[in-house]
Each structure stands twice: as structure tokens, then as C-alpha cells.
Image (cartoon, rainbow, N blue to C red):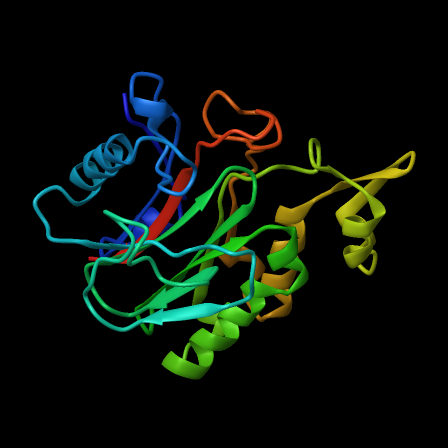
Amino acid sequence: MIDFYRFEHFQKYKELLHAVTTKSMGSPYEFSLALHTGEDQQEIIQNRTILSSLLAEDKQVHFVVADQTHSDHIKVIKSKETKGWQSLEDAVEDSDALITNVPDVVLTILTADCVPVLLYDERQKVVAAVHAGWKGTKKRIVAKTIVKMTEIFGCDPEDIIAGIAPSVGRCCYEVDRNVAGHFFDIPESFASVGEKFMLDLPLINKKQLLDAGIKKEHIEMSGICTSCEVDRFFSYRKEQGCSGRFMSMIGLI
């Protein structure tokens, strides 16, 4: 059975389509949606076709997938065009955040521990999807996405609603000083354990949202650790380099 995780505050808006996929043991590759990890392409495309039929039903929807590179590169999608859905060849190049105000376009993020952040400005009718691993978090990609939404679409950060989707939690994300050191200015974001550190990437991204002007009450955190809940979500760390990816997505319909 195909199931989804959804944010409560996004579900209040009829014009908003959003979902976070979960594992399905009866589907090819447990319903992985990644074309870039070496699985049979046709079976992954079959999973994506099932996904689109469940979400879009009879509506013509254009899914946009990016070639995620742990960068702070942000792409504004300006037209109704499917990208990277049937093939890697036409995916959005070298980008870890997508923004659009075009109806019937669904922005997607693929992860298996990194932090997916979904954004919606009800007033300006703008959505964004952000991929923030530790490198993207270090580069403050989520804050830069807010700035881009403001510059391009006139968004006011106080109007933006954010959802921080399932990702590896502080409970399971052990890193060395080379990684943790980038966040030592946020003491509440880590705990030292011997020579290692337990890092809280969801919390850091929440802080970056707050610093960017998002209201505290407008940020909904899933509170789900992908490593702890590996039965529901792919976890690269827990599964020791798994090739599966789940998808977080948002669009205007």
C-alpha cells in the first residue's frame, strides 16, 4: 500500500498539493523514486507513474526533478514543463532548491537522510522545495531560498509557511569535528560524544528559517528521524549506503 506523510498546516489549502512518500514493501525497490542510484530505470519510472496517478488523479501535472549536488544553487521554474521525471537527461541541472508560482507544477526533492524543506506563500501563491544536507545547511540554502522568493516574487517572509520533512535526527547523526565545526556558533544544535558530535540538522534549518523572518508558528517540523524510522523512510546512514530515495514535493494546483 502506498502511503504518504503530510503536514497539517499545508492541508488547509485546497490549492496546494504536497506529500512526502514512504516505503512500500510491495513495490519495486520498496517504492524508491530515484533514477540516479543504479536501479532498473523502468521500474523506478513505474513507481513515479503510480505516484503521479495517486496525487494528480485526472489532472495534468508537471513534476520537476533536479540534479541535486549539495550546492546552494536555486532554480526558478517559469513554465509548465516536466523535468527529470522520465529521464535524468532533462533534469534541472546542478540545483538544490526549486521555486515556482506556476500552477500544475510540482517541485520535488529526493532524500534518504538529508533535510527536505517545503515552503508556501499563500499571499503571493509561490512554492519552493529545498534540499539541505550538511553542506547545503552550511551554505544556508534555505535562507537563500527565502531571499530569492522575496526578490523574484515579492514574498514577505512573515507570509511563508514551512514544513521540515523527515530526515536524520540528532539522535542518530554522528559526525566528526570537520562537519560539526561549521555549526559551533549554534551550541544548541549539537552534543559532543567523545571526539564525535551528534548534529541536529533539522533544528539548524529551523533556526535559519527563523533568522530569515519566518514566524515560529509557521514552521511545522515532522519530528521524524529517518534512521529511527527506517521501516518507513530510506536512510542512507542506517542502511549503510542504501540506494533508495523518498520524495518530498509541493505544487499549486
Q: Relative to the observer, which residue lies in front, 197 or 7? A: 197
Q: Which residue occupies the extreme top position in the image?
A: 26
Q: Nearer the viewer, residue 148 or 27?
A: 27
Seen at 57% across and 68% down, the residue is 143
Left or right: residue 13 compared with residue 201? left
The residue under the point 27% across, 49% down is 87
The answer to whether residue 121 of the structure is visible from this angle is: no
| Count of marks placed on residues | 0
x, y percent for residue 205: 61, 55
How far across and how far down the image is residue 45, in percent? 24, 37
Q: Position of residue 240 (x, y in %)?
A: 60, 26
Q: Residue furthest right?
A: 194
Figure check: 237 above or below 131: above
Q: x, y (%) of residue 242? A: 52, 29
Among the 4 quarters of the image, the one containing residue 37: top left
Q: Using the rendered image of the protein, determine whether residue 21 is visible from the camera's viewpoint.
A: yes
- The residue at 27%/58% (across/down) is 83
The answer to whether 212 appears left or right of 47 in the picture is right
